[in-house]
């Protein structure tokens, strides 16, 4: 009985109308990647590398990083593992890095924007990832299962810059095969430019935490706004729809924000056309269960009327009414 339940968790999700979805996990370490593998995740959709940079009073060196990334890839045995480049600034700080003062840190230099301030930190991380990719298991397509993802991208200029940097570092290290490079969609401009980004990136991943924050102009750290700061707001749904339409046919698109692990939001994201949902390891099984046997065409038929509703609570109420089993 237990073995049958475990087998169901390990299987990929196929919806009633035949869509195949990956449910991957968000992790902070190789240890958590092992837990994600045990939980039946179809990969790691987001490895938040900041946590490695928080474990001591100085930045982790190249060897320490390479070991951690490689261990995460090995834990997943060839399923994709996406490592996000250091994402600091705003709500994420490191004790040994002093960031430029900004009146509003969420709109200041953060994520990929910090590369020119912190070239050694980013270059070392890139070198560690290139090194780890060399030894990582191969994915189903025969490429390294370890992949790189860029946080807080605003436009394709940033992607091109990192691509060139990645190629230069790989050449300096004598590595021919470049790791796949993806872009997080966390800024409304990036969502609206999805077609351009998807033409030059290997994959996109929508970070709904920041995308919701920046679309609604509601700070994710402000508790009194938390109830309204919801990805199911019609404006955010519409933006994600535009993003998925823009990227369609160009590259795969996943979702790695907290909304991916919310049963109602997960169904909407799948109906909008997301290829992968990446959730906390403890939510892999429930997210698969919420999607399995779901008729996405029926959910898609609800989208136009959902987009005319007033706010996220109205969308939630509509979904609960229309999809009682998912509530
Ligand atoms: C996001 O913004 O949705 C995301 C996944 O990144 P983080 O929560 O680490 O900012
Ligand atoms: Mg984010």
Image (cartoon, rainbow, N blue to C red):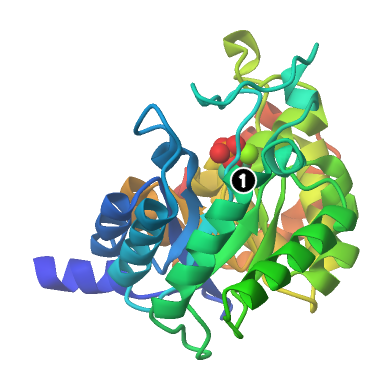
- Quadrant containing ligand 1 reads top right
Residue 106 locus on image (x, y percent): 73, 24
Vertical relation: 247 (above or below) 212? below
Residue 132 locus on image (x, y percent): 43, 69
Q: Is residue 280 visible?
A: yes
Residue behind mark 1: 120
Picture quarter containing residue 288? bottom left
Q: Is residue 319 visible?
A: no
Mark 1: which secondary structure?
helix
Q: Give the residue at x 81% y 33%.
A: 215
Left-right relation of 305 to 45: right
Q: Give the residue at x 61% y 45%.
A: 120
Residue 103 locus on image (x, y percent): 80, 11
In depth, the one of 194 and 103 nearer the eye is 103
Picture quarter containing residue 43? bottom left
Q: Give the residue at x 80% y 77%.
A: 250
Count all numbered tags in the image, as a single digit: 1
In depth, the one of 279 and 237 nearer the eye is 279
Picture quarter containing residue 320? top right
Furthest residue toward front: 172
Left-right relation of 2 to 70: left
Vertical relation: 82 (above or below) 313? below
Tag 1: Cα neighbours inside 10 Å, few (<14), some, or many (≥20)?
Answer: few
Left-right relation of 314 to 322: right
Furthest residue toward left: 1
Vertical relation: 2 (above or below) 327? below
């Amino acid at each position: 009985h237990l073995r049958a339940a475990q087998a169901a968790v390990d299987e990929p999700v196929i919806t009633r109308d035949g869509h195949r979805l990956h449910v991957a996990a968000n992790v902070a370490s190789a240890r958590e990647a092992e837990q994600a593998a045990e939980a039946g995740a179809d990969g790691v959709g987001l490895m938040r590398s900041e946590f490695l940079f928080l474990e001591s009073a100085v930045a982790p060196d190249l060897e320490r990083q390479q070991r951690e990334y490689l261990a995460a890839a090995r834990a997943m045995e060839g399923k994709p593992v996406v490592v996000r480049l250091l994402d600091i600034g705003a709500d994420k700080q490191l004790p040994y890095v002093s960031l430029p003062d900004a009146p509003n840190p969420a709109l200041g230099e953060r994520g990929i924007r910090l590369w020119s301030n912190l070239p050694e930190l980013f270059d070392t991380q890139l070198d560690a990832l290139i090194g780890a990719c060399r030894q990582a298991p191969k994915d189903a397509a025969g490429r390294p299962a370890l992949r790189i993802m860029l946080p807080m991208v605003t436009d394709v200029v940033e992607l091109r810059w990192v691509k060139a940097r990645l190629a230069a570092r790989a050449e300096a290290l004598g590595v021919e095969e470049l790791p796949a490079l993806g872009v997080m969609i966390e800024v409304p401009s990036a969502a609206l430019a999805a077609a351009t980004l998807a033409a030059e990136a290997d994959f996109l991943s929508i970070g709904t935490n920041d995308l919701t924050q920046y679309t609604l102009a509601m700070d994710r750290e402000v508790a009194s706004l938390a109830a309204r700061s919801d990805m199911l707001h019609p404006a955010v749904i519409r933006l994600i729809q535009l993003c998925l339409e823009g990227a369609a046919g160009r590259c795969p698109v996943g979702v790695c924000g907290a909304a991916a692990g919310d049963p109602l939001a997960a169904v909407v994201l799948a109906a909008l056309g997301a290829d992968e949902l990446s959730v906390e390891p403890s939510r892999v099984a429930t997210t698969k269960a919420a999607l399995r046997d779901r008729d996405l065409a029926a959910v898609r038929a609800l989208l136009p009327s959902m987009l005319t509703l007033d706010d996220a609570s109205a969308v939630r109420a509509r979904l609960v009414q229309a999809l009682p089993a998912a509530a």
